[in-house]
Image (cartoon, rainbow, N blue to C red):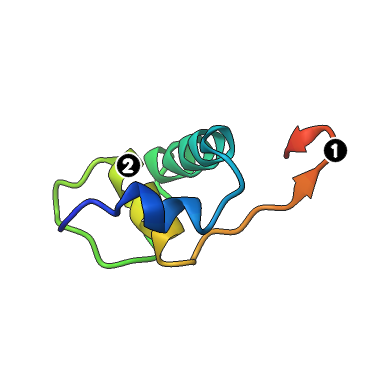
Amino acid sequence: MNRPSLDSLMGKVESKYALVVLAAKRARELTEKANPLVDVQEHAKPVSIALHEIAAGKIYYDELRGGIK
């Protein structure tokens, strides 16, 4: 499974900071046994899975004035 490029990820979020927060929150959910939304390798790490989900457009976030919630 190839890593998604930063260009493809930046098309889904407004900033690198939003990408980091979004990926971290999703990785935490995956660590707590949430099911992946994309096909993954058996030993893929949660952050890698989260980045693939963001690149595939499976994960969305609402931008709020106070930040990502």
Residue highlighted by disc 2: 46
Q: Is residue 23 above or below residue 3?
A: above
Q: Is residue 7 left or right of residue 60?
A: left
Q: Secondary structure at mark 1?
A: loop
Disc 1 marks a residue whose amino acid type is Arg
Q: Quadrant of residue 48?
A: top left
Mark positioned earlier in the residue sequence (1 or 2)? 2
Using residue 13 as the reference point, say whether residue 23 is left or right of it: left
What's the CA distance linking mark 1 and mark 2?
28 Å
Q: Is residue 35 visible?
A: no
Report the mark closest to the observer, 1 or 2.
Answer: 1
Question: Which quadrant does the N terminus fall into?
Answer: bottom left
- The residue located at (38%, 38%) in the rendering is 31
On screen, residue 29 above or below 58: above
Q: Residue at x 54, y 42 (%)?
A: 22
Q: Is residue 33 left or right of residue 20?
A: left
In which quadrant will I find the C terminus?
A: top right
Please state the horizontal and vertical placement of residue 40, each as a whole percent of the image. 22, 60
- Residue 66 showing in the rendered view: yes
The residue that mark 1 highlights is: 65
| 65, above or below 6, in the image | above
Q: Amino acid at mark 2?
A: Pro
Q: Nearer the viewer, residue 8 or 68?
A: 8
x and y, in percent, of residue 35 in the image: 39, 58
The kind of secondary structure element at disc 2 is helix
Expressed as whole percent of the image width and height from the top left, the position of residue 2 reads 17, 56
